[in-house]
Amino acid sequence: PLSLPPPPPPGEQDAASLPPYAGSTKFDQLPISSRTKDGLRNAEYVKMTDIQRASLPHSLCGRDVLGAAKTGSGKTLAFLIPVLEKLYRERWGPEDGVGSIIISPTRELAGQLFDVLKVVGKYHGLSAGLLIGGRKDVDLEKQSVNDLNILVCTPGRLLQHMDETPNFDCSQLKVLVLDEADRILDVGFKKTLNAIISQLPKHRQTMLFSATQTKSVQDLARLSLKDPEYISVHEES
Ligand code: ADP
Ligand code: MG
């Protein structure tokens, strides 16, 4: 039942060239799985917001994206949809382990985006876990963390699992997302984030979303971004 066009072959993506659906305004017009479309429809998401419309044609091609748009502009779906589609296209299954890691600066924000993931990803056969510390018993979490396909986490709790959980394996990671990237790249998380990044495979898609554009060359090098697309959406004034 796969009616998706094949993803563009790596290396043949010209940053200036965009696929024909780049002018779409509705989710239904995107080349995404019917599972994702059903999830979106169920939640009554029909029209894309500006940041979604501007970034999805790039992120769905597998490009690295740095997206900037104000709070409330719909950045969550701008990265959750490509995460789901990437794993779907790779035919990711329960035995494939961690395919995507989404990092959020606070427990509250991580919890909110996890809720959106549950709704929009409802028709995918993927497992997702919220690793945020505090609330849950970490020892219990350690038993299940290796069976999860998508991790939604705060930096500290993710690193704790990397350090302490036996056989914790993210060597097959396909997509890394930093939500509220400017806060995660801030000095307060520097050591933690560097320790996390050093344990992730470099060949992956990376997406950063925040209210302000991240242009620190040092940060981009740190994240091994490959020729990223800078997408900023500003309000009309
Ligand atoms: P941000 O992360 O940019 O602050 P969110 O992703 O949290 O924004 O979205 C803000 C609000 O907009 C949420 O209530 C969300 O459900 C809603 N929203 C997001 N995308 C759409 C859309 N395409 N259509 C309608 N509402 C949307
Ligand atoms: Mg957000």
Image: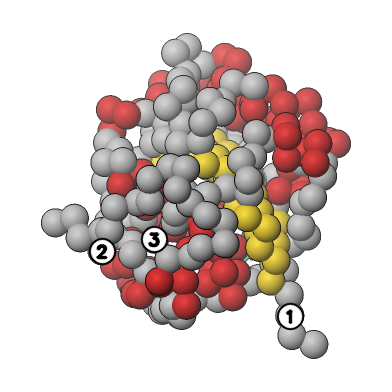
* Amino acid on which disc 1 is placed: Glu
Rendered image quadrant of residue 192: top right
Cα distance between the residues tagged 3 and 1: 27 Å
Q: Which mark is residue 174?
A: none
Q: What amino acid is found at the position of numbered circle 2 in the picture? A: Ser
Direction from residue 207 to residue 59 in the image, left or right: left
Q: CA distance from mark 1 to mark 2?
A: 32 Å
Counting from the top left corner in percent of width and height, residue 41 is at: 34, 73
- Say which of 125 and 28 sits in front: 28
Image quarter of the N terminus? bottom left
Residue designated by label 2: 34
Report whether residue 179 is seen: no
Q: Residue furthest right?
A: 187
| Three-letter amino acid code at the position of disc 3 | Val
- Which quarter of the figure is the C terminus placed in? bottom right
The residue most toward the left is 1
Name the element at disc 2. Answer: helix
Q: Is residue 179 left or right of residue 175?
A: right
Q: Are marks 1 and 2 in contact (CB under 8 Å)?
A: no
